[in-house]
Image (spheres, helix red, strand yellow):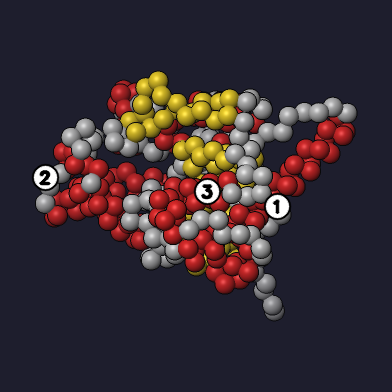
């Protein structure tokens, strides 16, 4: 008997996915790409051509389709309503490279014909401030769903999808490892908004007051996936680089780690990984993988070798 395997996703090898680029132009060079990369991230121009340009083409097609749907709705209503931004969600573990993915997509999408206005907002700004996390006994659960001001994030997304011209997002400082008081990113008349964060595909907890998901506001979502051991390696590598760079700043939250030996630093970074990031990945982040429209599967060398696209 022939048992055919069914899946809600179509799976593509790198070579097959690359063919879907068609004529989408490469609008960034080597120096621009390097400015978009995160610490210890490795993305080549070839990777941009083969992985990112097909994604940009797909997004462009989706944006155009929604624009046509908007015009049809206006025809039905007999009046001109304001078109709201196209919202993209990008999820994945700490240190998996989702911020780099978001920045590359922002740059490429901004260079599309007509130069759409593309804003990038990270959900870090919607974390509760450190003093509130301490009060709630959530210091060791920073990045877990309960450490975010979900109502504030949902209000931000609701305002965007309600067509508000100007919306403000709070700012997070990686230097101070905290939300910056009274500082905001202004999102004004955006065409496309990328929302990047580890838990953006997370459904609300059963006892939550709101039954609204953050992902309810997404027009397209991506999940950046890698094996847990590889992500841990990248996390430790990043920690070592930061000890020699950002941690050197006396104002850095992690300045206390500057004097640690290599062995002590491995022990400290591994402890943080095991207690917080690994737990968050396994309990909260990884289970949301199959809620994404696109899954990018990365290998040990950071390159994407397999892509899954949800069937429509």
Q: Earlier in the sequence, mark 1 or mark 2?
A: 1
Query: Which mark is in front, 2 or 3?
Result: 3
If you read the primary sequence from the N terminus, does the residue marked by circle 3 or circle 1 appear first?
A: 1
Cα gap from disc 1 to disc 2, whole angstroms: 52 Å
Q: Which residue is mark 2?
A: 259
Measure the C-alpha gap from mark 2 to mark 3: 38 Å
Q: Residues within 10 Å of mark 1 (few under 14, many from 20)?
A: few
- The quarter of the picture where residue 144 lies is top left
Q: Give percent across and percent down for residue 65.
A: 75, 47
* Residue found at x 34% / y 60%: 229
Q: Is residue 14 above or below residue 254?
A: below
x 41%, y 24%: residue:
183
Quadrant location of the N terminus in the rendered image: bottom right
Give the residue pinned by disc 1. Answer: 61
- Residue contact at pointers 2 and 3, CB within 8 angstroms: no
- In the rendered view, would you say 10 is above or below 125? below
Which residue carries the number 3 mark?
107
Which SS class for mark 2? loop
- At mark 3, the secondary structure is helix
| Left or right of 285 in this view: 231 | left
Which residue is nearer to you in this view: 191 or 142? 191
- Say few, some or many: other residues with alpha carbon within 10 Å of mark 2 (under 14 / 14 to 19 / 20 or more): few
Question: Nearer the viewer's eye, disc 3 or disc 1?
Answer: 3
Select label 1 or label 2 by which is in front: 1
């Amino acid at each position: 008997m022939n048992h055919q395997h069914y899946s809600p996703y179509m799976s593509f090898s790198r070579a097959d996915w690359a063919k879907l680029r068609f004529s989408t132009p490469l609008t960034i060079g080597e120096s621009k790409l390097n400015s978009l990369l995160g610490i210890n991230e490795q993305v080549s121009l070839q990777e941009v051509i083969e992985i990112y340009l097909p994604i940009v083409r797909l997004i462009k097609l989706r944006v155009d389709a929604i624009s046509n749907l908007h015009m049809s709705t206006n025809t039905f209503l007999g009046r001109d309503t304001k078109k709201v931004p196209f919202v993209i969600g990008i999820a994945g573990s700490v240190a998996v490279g989702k911020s780099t993915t978001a920045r590359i997509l922002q740059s490429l999408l901004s260079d599309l014909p007509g130069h759409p206005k593309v804003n990038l907002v990270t959900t870090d700004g919607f974390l509760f401030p450190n003093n509130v996390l301490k009060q709630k006994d959530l210091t060791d659960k920073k990045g877990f769903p309960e450490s975010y001001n979900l109502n504030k994030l949902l209000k931000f997304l609701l305002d965007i999808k309600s067509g508000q011209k100007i919306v403000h997002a709070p700012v997070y400082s990686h230097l101070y490892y905290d939300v910056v008081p009274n500082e905001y990113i202004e999102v004004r008349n955006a065409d496309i908004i990328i929302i990047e964060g580890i838990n953006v595909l997370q459904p609300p907890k059963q006892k939550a007051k709101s039954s609204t998901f953050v992902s309810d506001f997404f027009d397209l979502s991506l999940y950046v996936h890698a094996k847990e051991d590889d992500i841990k390696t990248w996390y430790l590598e990043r920690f070592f680089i930061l000890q020699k760079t950002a941690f050197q700043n006396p104002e850095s939250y992690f300045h206390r780690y500057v004097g640690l030996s290599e062995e002590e630093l491995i022990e400290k970074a591994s402890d943080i990984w095991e207690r917080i990031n690994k737990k968050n990945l396994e309990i909260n982040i990884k289970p949301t993988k199959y809620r994404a429209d696109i899954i990018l599967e990365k290998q040990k060398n950071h390159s994407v070798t397999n892509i899954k696209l949800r069937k429509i």
